[in-house]
Amino acid sequence: MSKSLLLCDCLGSQKIDTAALEKATGLACGACHNSLCTDQIDIATAAIASGDVIVACQQEARLFAEIADEIDAPEPVFVDIRDRAGWSDGSDDTTPKMAALVADAQLAHPASKSIDVVTEGTCLIIGKAEVCQPAAEKLADILAVTVLLASGDDIAPTQAFDTVVGALHQATGTLGRFDIRINAFQQSVVGGRGTPALTAPRDGALSQCDIILDLTGGVPLFPAPEKRDGYLRADPKSQPAVADAIFAASQLVGTFEKPLYVRLEPSLCAHSRAEKPACSNCLNVCPTGAIVSAGEHVSIDPLICAGCGACSAVCPSGAISYDAPSTDFIFRRITALATAYRAAGGRNGTLLVHDDHGAEMISLAARYGRGLPAHVIPMEISALSGFGHAEMLGALAAGFARVDLLLAPKTERDALDPQLELALAISGERIALLDISDPHALSDHLFEKEPGTAIEKPVLPMGTRRQIARLSAKALNPEAQSIALPEGAPYGAVIVDTDACTLCLACASLCPSGALGDNPDLPQLRFQEDACLQCGLCANVCPEDAITLEPQLNLTDMALSQTILNEEEPFACIECGSLFGVKSTVEKITEKLAGKHAMFANPEAARMIQMCDNCRINAQYHSDNNPFAAGERPRPRTTDDYLSKRKDH
């Protein structure tokens, strides 16, 4: 059964060219209805019952989903063409934009991954007694509550909850698995008259809890506290805030699904090698501290990760990738929007990327203001900070003339600002971050901003993020051979001071991406620029400080092949003539050691410096101080040997 598009002009408040939209989308549209959610509900019910239908109304999605459930029909796909296209003050044709939104809605979203988090309701409340104890009384019937008070606070004699005294020294973990350490820890003694007595204080007391309710009003216990599941804070001077926090805590009992936002491939990580530091981009931008160093790669705690996506945007190697949904799906959405818009006759479109905060802004701008221009195509994503330079460039290369990112109060700018700088260096002034909080100001800005001109021949963004960035850069700069990039960019060249380089090849042996390599037959240092992550490990391990990095994007085919950064003449073995090592290095070692070092005081021993491995072993074997002439190594004595000796006696 072919899909159909169920249209409604919402009491005549928007204009829909049904015939043009049917032609642009290839979907059967039929008549444009007037009030499907009220007077014409029977028409909507019949359409939903018929099967595969797309309902062009997001506002009443819940109502239509309930109808589908009641009549045992598949839940329809919903697309908002009213707030995002139909309610617009512009005179331009909105059909191409509507067609693009419908194409985006038809993409099948990949199934999300999650992990179960179980909480039994153990709750720690910290703060002053006058705030914590009333809060504990309200939660005591729902949660297993312990109140932590500072020394000197009055303790209420109650059996409804536990009360301890001390200073919270450290807290780690997240919902369902907080670990806490308390110094000067004292427990209240049950029984007796008057204020409960306390046990002797002790430091380093350890405990666990599922929920922490922080009513201190002081410094948060965790970075980005609003993103830490199970950690609730409230200003103790605000009764509504405290009441909201108490209610939120009461709901945190049971089993919850925690999305798995990112995927890590440790083998691709360029964090470090041989205890030498390299890339720490993800560590620098993670707001929650979910990413930590784990030797040669990083480790991500999925339960602490809040899904901002910043780590995925800044990872140069692709070791970290966003997975809720995947980056590949984001590029598929970009392609679907751009292709459908252009196929329906749209030209020079602007992609407006936003999150749920931006969706609310767009809805308010449409209902009470000018709405969005016909050439501005909105795309909602869950992690705005994960929309990095590759996605920005990919959107331009796919056929958009401009890309705007509508920021929200929760957007992590630490990752986005450098990504914007990098994208601008490659694309020119075609991308912007919109830090606008007023819906009317947003509409005014978009109507006044000229979109520019899209490229004539769009490309299909496929492959890894690095491959897409390079492909897009070539499409946007067809005449350029190389583009200078800002410091810290993940693309560039390695510059070697050949006078200082000794060809020790430490850089090649540790390069995490394989951009630097050797030649097994000749003393050469080879380099493939396209693979270089600019992680800096080669410069950090070079004993001669002979390496510097030059951020740039080489768009020629030379970047895809190996070039020689340094090479020298090999040394010929004085015995067999086979080539080994570097001639200048062997000569320097001979000059420094022959006749000057105790091991090489003998001319015969000094000659071994200039021999290959095989000839050196032969020379040692036939020397006067032959280390191989000691005979067979004695067999280690065992318990059986000792017991056998005792029997003989």
Image (cartoon, rainbow, N blue to C red):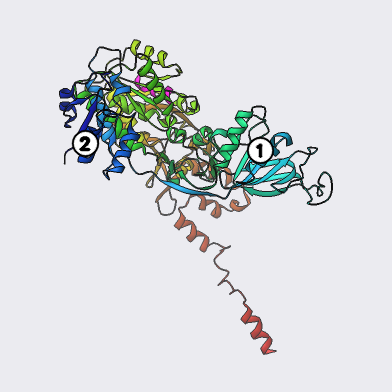
Q: CA distance from mark 2 to mark 1?
A: 52 Å
The numbered dot on residue 94 is none
Quarter where residue 425 is shown: top left
Q: Which residue is mark 1?
A: 135
Q: Is residue 263 left or right of residue 139?
A: left
Give the amino acid at mark 1: Ala
Q: Which residues are magenta?
A: 419-428
Magenta stretch holds residue 421: yes
Q: Is residue 253 visible?
A: yes
Give the secondary structure at mark 2: helix
Residue closer to the observer: 210 or 130: 130
Q: Is residue 523 visible?
A: no
Residue closer to the observer: 200 or 338: 200
Indicate the quadrant containing the N terminus: top left, top right, bottom left or bottom right: top left
Quarter where residue 629 is shown: bottom right
Indicate the quadrant containing the C terminus: top left, top right, bottom left or bottom right: bottom right
Magenta stretch holds residue 219: no
Residue at point 22%, 40% (across, down): 49
- Majority secondary structure of the magenta segment? helix
Q: Which residue is mark 2?
A: 47
In the rendered image, the residue lying farthest to the front is: 39
Q: First in sequence, mark 2 or 1: give its number.
A: 2
Give the secondary structure at mark 1: helix
Which class describes the residues within 10 Å of circle 1: few (<14), some (14-19), or many (20+)? many
Give the amino acid at mark 2: Ala
Residue at point 32%, 12% (across, down): 450
Which class describes the residues within 10 Å of circle 2: few (<14), some (14-19), or many (20+)? some
In the rendered image, the residue lying farthest to the right is: 193
